[in-house]
Amino acid sequence: MRTVLVVAMLLTGLSVLAPRDALAAEPRVGIHVRDGRVVEANGSDLVLRGVNHDFMWWPNRNDVFAGIKAAGANAVRVPLGIGHQWRLAKKEEVANLVGLCEKNRLICVFDAHDTTGFGQDKKAATMAQAVQFWLGMRDVLVGHEDHIIVNIANEPFGNGTTMPWMQQTSDAIRSLRAAGFKHALMVDGPGWGQDESFVMRDNAERVVAADPLGNTLFDIHMYGMFNNAGKVNSYLSSFTQRRLPIVIGEFSGEHQWGDPDEDAIMAYAEARELGYFGWSWSGNDAQYSYLDLVKNFDANSRTAWGQRFINGPNGLTTDTREATVFRNGTGADRKGPAPQGVTVADVTSNSVRLSWQRRPGAVGTTYQVVAVNGAAEVRVLTTSRTDVTLKGLKGSTEYTYAVYSRDLLGKRSPRSAMVAAVTPPAR
């Protein structure tokens, strides 16, 4: 659970560098895997909670991102057509989606959807064809590793134990890494995503070993096969006990092939702090309308499934935290004599560096840093500098700061824009 604390900090003249992942040869880029957990570049836990939006069927419904965010999501999974089962997504469309996710402060998971059910669906694309699609999208994805995850291939094989899932998944990872992709990569289970023969479960370590960056997470889709708490718990724990990152990329409250135990899925995800994505926001065919979270893309008209998923026990509104990449950084400037350009940097589990612009021509100006909690303020320090490091913070905690300036006559300026810092867990 998130706790917002406002405490007094000590001023130091030394900047503290963010801790480095001991397993990496160089600092990680963007979202990555650390010790079986999905984390951000600064080491903060990233528990993905969101919904699926069927872009391949509804490419013009860009208004949904604001509604998804307002519902409490911190992420969205976006199926893309790659020109086999569904229309090929254009590069400019994907670039626009990247911008929409950033604008709406959502982590975006893009998946190549045409691989669904390969081996049993004759229209399905191969995993190699999915890789070629991603290579064509490289230019619009590279540089956005802090808020984009590449889901290589949706439900890449049908049922059975003879599908070459492990080898082809490993080859796909190597190909993307060789092409310069440093994104977190997500891989789906075979068996129409449900891993009914446990091929993904039993070969997960071998797939991780194929990734030179060690930055691969697993995606299980929980539908009719996961119809009771025992099955849900057994599958998820098989990954968490081995410190392998697992996300529930799709699930629903009911399904034509069995009744998923959505209560267990959400409860176990919450207990283990695992990500999940409900299927889906809106626009399913009439016979599958029970899968819609909202009616006719109206964010204010939730279905029974939408009410359960968003507001029910362990739902989106329970404990979803916005990614720190959208919190830490530069606050929006305000007009007038208030300090401008207040910026957060070097966030560690126990410190943060604040900086701002010096008032032009001001002589003898001092600055007062305050911690903000709603309408309340607590003075942290007064300084003549424009760059300070605050220590004594706690890990996994949100802090909000602002700055005032004071002239030689003691007149205090309006308060600056606020900036937020979310500290990563203490090691």
Image: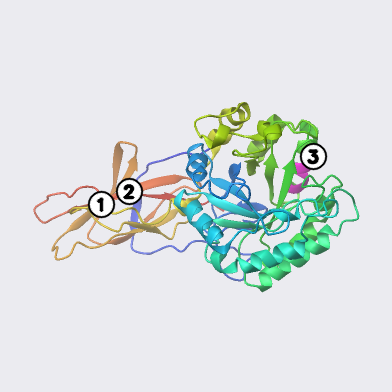
Q: Which mark is residue 418?
A: 2
Residue depth check, mark 1 versus mark 3: number of the one nearer the observer: 1
Secondary structure state at the residue bearing disc 1? loop
**N-terminal of the two: label 1 or label 3?**
3
**N-terminal of the two: label 2 or label 3?**
3
Q: Which mark is residue 234?
A: 3
Q: Which mark is residue 268?
A: none
Tag 2: residue type? Met
Residue extending farthest left: 409
Residue depicted at 67% across the width and 37% down the height: 285
Q: Which residues are magenta?
A: 235-240
Instruction: Work out how far the residue at label 1 is from the one at label 3, CA to CA, in angstroms.
Output: 52 Å
Where residue 128 sits: x, y (%)? 76, 65
Please say if 259 is above or below 366: above
Tag 3: residue type? Ser
Q: Nearer the viewer, residue 369 or 269?
A: 269
Secondary structure state at the residue bearing disc 3? helix
Residue depicted at 83% across the width and 50% down the height: 158
Residue depicted at 30% across the width and 36% down the height: 375
**N-terminal of the two: label 2 or label 1?**
1
Side of 179 relative to 348 (left or right): right
Please say if 136 is above or below 256: below
